[in-house]
């Protein structure tokens, strides 16, 4: 098939593009390189350097004539969304509208967020649970979801929403939100101190980036819908740190510092619907995924 990957020079997008090419698909990467890197674009993909807010986006899509659009371009930093909510909305709401307009009849697979939309999760969150975003980022992503649903009702399209857990893996940027695995492993590779905000007992649903790409492929051809993409397994930040130490060989204990305002205590996703309707379940264990990420981190630092 012919595919466009917005944000394809970024962390998750580059993995989606890479796997599409491995399947023999035609791939166009749309990225303004604000946070993405040209070297992340895999060989064989064509890069169109344009901002998703640009009115000329439709021309790039018309030229590519995609069958499916994987929409991963986003402003993904919670702190930035708090400091610059209008900018966050421009990228994550207006940008998503531009993508929907440009896609025309092509199916859009939209990557949204789990934790930033559901809020605290005393039990694994289901897709139909109440949505309680705690940041402008979560609210903007939720608005993007509603635009997709509106497009489906208005135009008979079959756009799909994927709500992601805490994604980790090769090529993750430690300077961006959600990159705790990248932060830990990069610091351990350098022998630097690692910090944990709060008591470290806060729990997250860590899902390997390759599994996210597979979930995105499983969504193609579906007749709309919203699906959680995680593992359903809660892992504390302290337990994550211990596993990173084991894999990296680090002997330094973490330093506990003051908790950050607004951090969730527990964010875990129920993936029953994804398993039942998409036929998708993650198979990469956290330890296996961390070992792959550590091997890449050591190579990048060399």
Image (cartoon, rainbow, N blue to C red):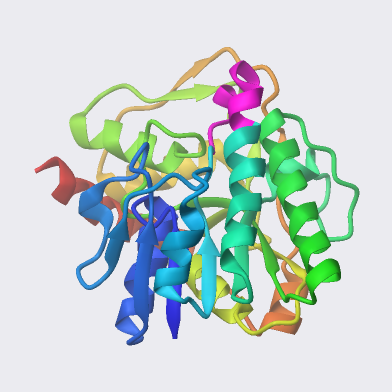
Query: Which of 220/301 is in front?
Result: 220
Task: Residue 300 in the image: state x and y as whole percent.
Answer: 17, 46
Residue at the outermost top position: 258
146 displayed left or right of 170: right
Give the quarter of the figure containing the N terminus.
bottom left
Residue at the outermost left position: 302
The correct choice, above or below, for 24 with respect to 137 in the image is below
Give the quarter of the figure containing the C terminus.
top left
274 displayed left or right of 231: right
175 displayed left or right of 213: left
**Magenta stretch contains residue 299:** no
Query: Which of 212/13 is in front?
Result: 13
Q: Is residue 209 visible?
A: no
Q: Is residue 153 visible?
A: yes
Q: Residue at 58% across / 57% down in the picture?
A: 99
Q: Residue at 69% across / 45% down in the picture?
A: 141
**Magenta stretch contains residue 78:** yes
The correct choice, above or below, for 13 with respect to 250 in the image is below
The tally of labels here is: 0
Residue 288 sits in quarter: bottom left
- Provide the residue span drawn in magenta: 76-88
Task: Residue 233 in the image: state x and y as whole percent.
Answer: 65, 58
Q: Residue at 38% across / 77% down in the picture?
A: 20
């Amino acid at each position: 098939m012919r595919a466009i990957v917005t944000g394809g020079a970024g962390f998750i997008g580059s993995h989606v593009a890479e796997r599409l090419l491995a399947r023999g698909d035609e791939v166009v990467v749309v990225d303004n390189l604000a946070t993405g890197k040209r070297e992340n674009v895999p060989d064989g993909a064509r890069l169109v350097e344009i901002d998703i807010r640009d009115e000329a986006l439709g021309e790039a899509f018309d030229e590519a004539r995609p069958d499916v659009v994987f929409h991963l371009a986003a402003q993904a930093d919670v702190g930035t969304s708090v400091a610059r909510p209008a900018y966050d909305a421009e990228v994550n709401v207006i940008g998503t509208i531009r993508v929907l307009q440009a896609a025309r009849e092509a199916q859009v697979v939209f990557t949204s967020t789990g934790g930033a939309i559901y809020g605290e999760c005393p039990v694994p969150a289901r897709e139909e649970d109440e949505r309680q975003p705690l940041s402008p980022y979560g609210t903007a992503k939720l608005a993007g979801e509603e635009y997709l649903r509106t497009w489906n009702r208005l135009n008979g399209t079959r756009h799909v929403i994927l709500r992601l857990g805490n994604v980790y893996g090769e090529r993750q940027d430690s300077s961006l939100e959600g990159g705790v695995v990248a932060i830990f492993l990069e610091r351990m590779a350098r022998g630097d101190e690692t910090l944990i905000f709060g008591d470290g007992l806060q729990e997250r649903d860590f899902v390997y980036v390759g599994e996210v790409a597979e979930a995105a492929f499983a969504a193609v051809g579906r007749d709309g819908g919203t699906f959680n993409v995680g593992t359903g397994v809660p892992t504390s930040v302290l337990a994550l740190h211990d596993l990173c130490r084991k894999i990296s060989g680090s002997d330094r204990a973490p330093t506990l510092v003051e908790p950050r305002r607004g951090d969730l205590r527990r964010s875990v996703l129920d993936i029953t619907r994804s398993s039942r309707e998409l036929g998708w379940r993650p198979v990469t264990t956290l330890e296996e995924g961390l070992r792959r990420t550590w091997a890449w981190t050591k190579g990048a630092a060399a």
